[in-house]
Amino acid sequence: MDPRIELTLPLAPGGSVSGLWATPPGEQSPWTVVYAPGAGSNLHDPFGGFLAEHLAALGIPSLRFQFPYQESESAQPDRPPVLEAAWDAAIATAAARGGRLVLTGRSMGGRIASMVVATGAPAAALGLFAYPLHPPGRPQQRRDGHLAAITIPTLFCSGTRDAFATADELAVAAALVPRSSVHLLEGADHGFAVLKSSGRTRPQVWAEAAQALTDWLVSLR
């Protein structure tokens, strides 16, 4: 039996987005993970799917969702208030099902999660995969002004070849968050791809990133 349940998440003031709720069999973890994809992906983001399976194997329920522009198959991301409204809807849906909420996302999905947490969204922890600290080649255009307002435990997990934040830049940004941790994926770029010479595959990087999240959650108990 497929444990995934298709959901429709209502938005305020109107409209909706699609979600996938995964309930693992047997005894469940006290955590519930909510995940949003990056700007160029959608509900079926491969890393998001991998992460959901990894979490289910450990008894952790998860909710994946997509943003309105991804729902309409537009290439142009929504404005931040619309993206934040989608996160609000996902948080409300997950909270109604119980568990300590862990908000996670890849690239833009994580950046918007960090923004709603900085303004008080209810969550117990925050996991940021490939945080887009700045556009590639434009380190002066930093997206870290809100990070100091985050008070919950936060994990930054990015590749050492990520053009959106070098390892040093990521460390400086993470230091703005009082309760932060950093996990570096050796040789991975922003999309978690690695060079063939590394001897690793992208799924192996996904596995490391997913394990980094769940190991970190264990450390928070």
Image (spheres, helix red, strand yellow):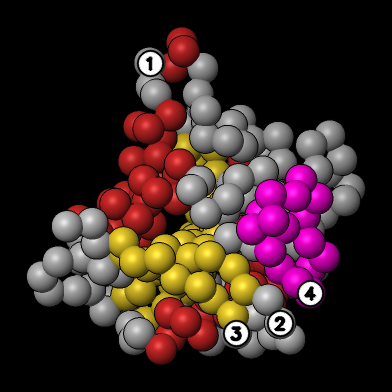
Residue 101, horizontal then vertical, whole percent: 42, 78
Per the model, the C-alpha gap separating discs 1 and 4 is: 42 Å
Per the model, the C-alpha gap separating discs 2 and 3 is: 20 Å
Could you tell which of marks 4 and 3 lies nearer the N-terminus? 4
SS for callout 4 = helix
Per the model, the C-alpha gap separating discs 1 and 2 is: 48 Å
Could you tell which of marks 1 and 4 lies nearer the N-terminus? 4
Residue at position x 58%, y 50% in the image: 42
Question: Looking at the image, which is closer to me, 156 or 45?
Answer: 45
Residue 30, above or below 42: below
Residue at position x 45%, y 50% in the image: 48
The quarter of the rendered structure image containing the C terminus is: bottom left
Query: Disc 3 marks which residue?
Result: 121
Query: Disc 1 marks which residue?
Result: 199
Residue 207, horizontal then vertical, whole percent: 34, 41
Residue at position x 52%, y 28% in the image: 193
Based on the picture, tell me whether residue 70 belongs to the magenta stretch.
yes
Per the model, the C-alpha gap separating discs 4 and 3 is: 14 Å
Q: Inspect the image, locate mark 1, and give the three-letter code of the amino acid beneath it.
A: Gly
Per the model, the C-alpha gap separating discs 3 and 1 is: 40 Å
Per the model, the C-alpha gap separating discs 2 and 4 is: 13 Å
Question: Looking at the image, which is closer to me, 192 or 52?
Answer: 52
Question: Which region is colored magenta?
Answer: 68-83
Query: Disc 4 marks which residue?
Result: 81
Residue 19, above or below 70: below
Residue 123, horizontal then vertical, whole percent: 49, 81
SS for callout 1 = loop
Residue 14's mark? 2
On the rendered structure, is 35 left or right of 16?
left
Q: Is residue 134 visible?
A: no
Based on the picture, tell me whether residue 4 belongs to the magenta stretch.
no
